[in-house]
Amino acid sequence: MVPLHWCMLWLLLPLSSRTQKLPTRDEELFQMQIRDKAFFHDSSVIPDGAEISSYLFRDTPKRYFFVVEEDNTPLSVTVTPCDAPLAWTLSLQELPEDASGEGSGDPEPLDQQKQQIINVEGTELFSYKGNDVEYFISSSSPSGLYQLELLSTEKDTHFKVYATTTPESDQPYPELPYDPRVDVTSLGCTTVTLAWKPSPTASLLKQPIQYCVVINKEHNFKSLCAVEAKLSADDAFMMAPKPGLDFSPFDFAHFGFASDASGKERSFLTKPSPKLGRHAYSRPKADIQKICIGNKNIFTVSDLKPDTQYYFDVFVANSNSNMSTAYVGTFARTKEEAKQKTVELKDGKVTDVFVKRKGAKFLRFAPVSSHQKVTFFIHSCLDAVQIQVRRDGKLLLSQNVEGIRQFQLRGKPKAKYLIRLKGNKKGASMLKILATTRPSKQSFPSLPEDTRIKAFDKLRTCSSATVAWLGTQERNKFCIYKKEVNDNYSEDQKKREQNQCLGPDTRKKSEKVLCKYFHSQNLQKAVTTETIKGLQPGKSYLLDVYVTGHGGHSVKYQSKVVKTRKFC
C-alpha cells in the first residue's frame, strides 16, 4: 500500500519540494502551514480543522481530498451551499498498489499518477442533494484517502467546506439550544418583535458570539453564507474566477474574499466583526436586510410595511472563528393599517387637518358643477407637510408645503380629487386647506418672503419698544399683540407659540395693542413700524403680528421677544 502522504502529493500541482508535509492535525507545523498560502496553491486538499471557501461552475464537478492517517479516527465533514443547491458525495478511495511507479526504472509522470488515483472508484459513504447545511459524522473512520465531489446543476455558485478529525474539541460552529426556533412575541403594523433562546456556546462554553437577524420578503435562509451571497449578488467583487485560473481555496483574493495577515478568512460583506452589543448594519439590497445585534436574544424589527409578509432568520456567529449556525426561521404578516376616514372638502370652506408624526390623512374634493380650474390653498401651521393631489386616479401634484401655498390645477367635468397629506419625521403637523372652483378673492392673505419681526435696540426705553415688519402689494389688516413672559422664556415655549394657524381670536383682549391696514405697490417700501407703549421697566414681552386676508383667514408672523430697559 502506498503511504498516504505520497498519494496526497500526487494530487497537488508541482510544489517547491515533494517532501513537504501535509496539513494534518498530528503535524506540529499545522498552524504555520495553514498560514502559508503557497502550500495550498491550486490545491485539492482540504486541511484538517479549517473552513475553505470555493467556487463551482455549473455542471462542472469539483473534487477535494482529505487524509485520515489512522484507523478508528473520528471524522466530520460539513458542506455549506451559499446561493444554489449542491449535489455532493463523500467516498473512501482505494489506492492502486503500483501508483508509486516502483518496480520500473522511470517514475510515471505526475499528471498520470494523479489521474490513476482519481479514476479509481471508491466506496461511497454519504451523498446529499439540496441547499441545506449538511453533515457527515463518524465516530470511527478507517484510515485512507477520502474524496469529496461537489456539483451544481443550477448555476455557478460558491460554497464552504469544513472537515476535521477532532470534532469534539474543535466546535467551530456555535451550538443551538434545545429549542432552536425563532418566536414572534409582538406584531404591529410596522414592527415585529422576535425572541429566541440563547446559544449554549455563550452561556456554557463562554465563547464570544453575536446574533445576526435577517429580514426579507421572499423565503427563509438556511445559512448566513446564503444571505451574504444574496446581499452581494450585484457586487463586482463576487465575480466568478475564470476557468483555468490558478486559485486556491485559501487564495481568497482571486474571487473577492479579503484575508488578514494571519490568513484567517474575513467576512466578505462587512468589516471585521463589530464589538458585541453594538449594532452593525449591512447595506440592504434586493429587499433583504442583515442586522447584527451583539449577544441580545430579543430584537424589534421596525419600519416594516403594513399588511406585508416577512421572513425572519437568526444566525449565531462565533466571533473567534467567524463561523455561524442558523436557528429555525419564522415568518409573519404585519397587521393591516386601520382604514383612514376620508374627509370631504366643501367648495370654498377652510378645513382644519391634523396629521400624526409620519402619518397620513386623505381628503376628497368632488365639485358639484362643471369647472375649468380648481384652486387649492394650503396653510402649514408648523413643520412642512407633503401634499399629493390625484384627479380620477391620475397624479397631478406632489410637493412639500411650508407656510402658505396656492396651487391651481386644470379642471375636468365631473372630476373627483383625492388629496393625500403626509406628516414629516420631526413631529405632528397641523394645517388648513381650502379647495374651490371659484377663487374670486383669495381666502388666505399674501405674505412677504421674510415674516420676521425686527426690534430696534437703540429705540428701546423703560416703557416702550419699537418694531417693524414687512408687508406686500395687497392691502391687508395687521394686528399686533403683546404678552409679558418670564426672563427665562425657553425655546420650547417659543416653539409652542409658533403655531401660525392660531388666530387673534385665541388671544386675550388685554393683549391687543392695535390693528392697522397698509400695503405698497413698491415692495422696497412695504415696511411698517410701530411703537408699543405702556410697558414695565426691565420686563420681557412676547410680540405677535397677525395678518388677515379678505376671506377672514389669519396668519401669524414669527414671534419676537423684546425686553425693556431697567434703568432710564
Image (tube, rainbow, N blue to C red):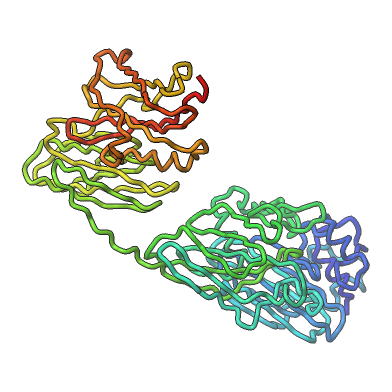
Residue in the picture at 29% in, 34% down:
555
Farthest left residue in view: 369
Q: Nearer the viewer, residue 209 or 77?
A: 209
Identify whether 147 is placed above or below 397: below
Question: Is any part of residue 525 visible from this angle?
Answer: yes
Quick one: 439 or 125, which is closer to the camera?
439
| Residue 62 seen in this snapshot | no
**Would residue 147 appear left or right of 406 to someone viewing this image?**
right
Instruction: Give the x, y percent position of residue 6.
Output: 88, 70
Residue 261's place in the image compared with 314, above or below, is: above
Q: Could you tell me residue 84's position as x and y percent?
A: 56, 66
Relative to residue 508, is residue 257 drawn left or right? right
Quadrant position of the N terminus in the picture: bottom right
Q: Quadrant of residue 315?
A: bottom right
Of residues 78 and 450, the one drawn nearer to the viewer in this rendering:
450
Q: Quadrant of residue 374?
A: top left
Q: Is residue 5 left or right of residue 526?
A: right
Could you tell me how many numbered marks the image carries? 0
Residue depicted at 32% across the width and 18% down the height:
528
Residue at the image position 23 percent from the left and 31 percent from the top: 548
Front-most of 346 and 110?
346
Q: Residue at x 65, y 60 (%)?
A: 55
Residue 344 screen position, x and y as percent: 18, 52
In the image, residue 62 lies at what x, y percent? 67, 66
